[in-house]
Image: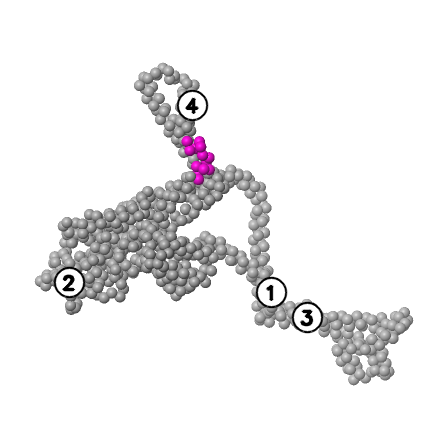
Amino acid sequence: MSSVAGRVRHLDAQVDQISLVPLTLADEGESDSEETILARPCPSEAVSKVDALSSPRVQELLRISKSLSTTSSSRSLLSPQKICRLLQQSRIADGPGAVTTRDRSGKQHFEREIEWYVVGKATIQTYGVILSTLLDQIIPLSDDIWYWEEVLASYSYSTLYTIQTSPIRAWTWTEGIYVSSRTRLRQLRMASAGGVDARSLGNSVLQRWRRFYSIVRVSIEERTIGDLPRRVLSPVALCRGQARQKCVQLRRLREMIASALGVIIGEGLDFEVSDEAAKSEMAEKSHEWKDVLERSVSLMDMVLRGVLTLDTPTAEFEEQVFASVSTDPELSVNMEDVNEPERPAVLARRLMELLDLALPQHVAATKRLVVENGRPSPLIRYWLPAGLLLISSSTILRLLVNHRSDILNWVADLGTTMRDFWFNWVIEPAKRIIGTIRHDSNSEIAIMSRESLKADRDSLERMVVDFALDNPHLATGSSSLNDAQISEVRAKVKEGDVTPVLKAYEKDLRRPFVGAVKGDLVRALLIQVQKTKVDLEVAISGIDALLKSQELVFGFVGLTPGILVLVATVRYLRTLRGGRKGLRRSQRAERIVRVLRKIDRILMEAGAVENKLLSYQHHGLLLCEVHVLRELAHGLLPKDVEKEFIQDLDDVVNLKGTHVQHMALERIRWAYSRWWS
């Protein structure tokens, strides 16, 4: 909910309290004041509330008032067209004579109070529409002012702006020469038609061409001589002067709109009723709130009429507005013969005129000023690169056509690469991880085959046993081996002990050639090769077991690169998408800090003296920045913290003295900085 919507809802609740108090007290047995008793209709003309509410006219007015209430929909503010349409449906602007159902004075009084209630609701909606319109107009002006300041701050930007606007200046110069030449040619024809030296003018084509050329040359010379600044100053200096003038105009417009905001919020619809006010206090205010409505509508009308007079100082503009409101002939206090039943009709007609004529005219005039003094259109700013792109478009198109097959292959390869990356680095590692969790045998990590070690170990065992059977004296020192001894040899081989083979190897190694020919040197050597192979496989099986114990870890390691690339791509795409939809979180945080700085500057410019109040202009600027800050902070803060943040913002806006506002600003800085730091 924006600051304007919050204020409109607050005022709507106050109107509900103030305007309905006389109607509720009319049927209560409370002790009333003398003025209240005298204001009531006499008993012979009194009509009960039930009879009044049963009137079709009252039912229609109550329905319209409900449509004008801020609680009628999720949106607090209605459009100007809908407000006017509801006022037309109420027929309040037609006057009391237009409704023929009023047959008794008591009912007339009740209906008149309901009419005031409807007009009050419409006034509050109009108040919100005007505030929202002024805020929407003043906020973009900062960007345009910043653009001109950038142009003026750098000679390079000034030169670029000169190049960008050169076609407009050339067109203006050519148009001036054309208008001047056409005027001279028309005067020459009038002189020829009047018979003034008609023969000397000549009728041949060559003479006409010479005459036309002389006219154009004289027009160019006169325009060149008359345009003294263009002859003295360079084009860049002229453009800097134009930029400076436009920047000044935009600043004046911003100050005037800020002053208008401050005047409307500070002086408009000030009922001076608290939420905890008693019924007696609200009954006293019920005699004054109608005058407040009239003055507020007059104030909004006068503000819209004079807010675009940029040559008027803001202080003088404020004085003129207050003077015009005090002497407004449509106010009941300035009328000699006040017709009480006509007051709602006059106010309704003025509201409709304000919404139908004054507000659209103000919006159109403001748009014209912004177009004249704002930053150039995108067509002017980017005509040079667009022109270069247009000139080179044929070359670019020819290159694209000539390399069409390469481009298509590149696109196809890109798609294939993305698909292979997705399946090979995301899907397959994920499948392996799932298989590992489920103990899928196909997904287990294995450096060597499962039966390789067993087969090699059994082969080594058979080799050593056969060698021991052939050479029993090397194994046990006896001439033969029994079953127990053979089993013992097998057991030792399983433990890695091949002592019989090593003894034969050591014996034959003393005489290698004889051992190789007659002995068992070669056989022992080959058995040791098999032993080395078995030892190597045992070591590898240990590594294999270690890998199997950490198989899930390796699975996640294999999945990590694909996930990282995927997350980085998704975040980049989300960044691009967020750039289109609005500011990213970091950018919003940076803008919040800048807005807080602007608020501090506004309070410093207004004066840091204790209990000093802001001017209407500074109050309007402050409201604008607070509105922007509230929109930026929405979504960054938790909901419960955002409520406290809005309360502190209200303390910054409330006119309790710049010292109190500075304290509220400092409280915002240290209390909520963690969400945008």
Location of mark 3 (residue): 543
Residue at disc 1, secondary structure: helix
Left or right: where does residue 64 sit relative to residue 475?
A: left
Q: Nearer the viewer's eye, disc 1 or disc 2?
A: 2
Question: Would you say the residues marked 1 and 4 are in contact, meaning their CB atoms lie under 8 Å apart?
Answer: no
Residue with the most extreme left position: 44
In the picture of the structure, the residue carrying the numbered disc 1 is 557
Residue type at numbered disc 3: Ile
Q: Is residue 122 above or below residue 24?
A: above
Which type of secondary structure does the marked residue at label 2 adopt? Answer: helix
Which of the two labelled residues, at mark 3 and mark 2, occupies the earlier sequence position? 2
Could you tell me the amino acid type at mark 4?
Tyr
Q: Quadrant of residue 500?
A: bottom right
Which residue matches tag 4? 213
Q: Quadrant of the N terminus?
A: bottom left
Three-letter amino acid code at disc 1?
A: Val
Residue 374 on the magenta span: no
Q: Is residue 394 above or below residue 653?
A: above
Label 1: few (<14), some (14–19) or many (≥20) C-alpha neighbours in 10 Å: few
Picture quarter containing residue 122? bottom left
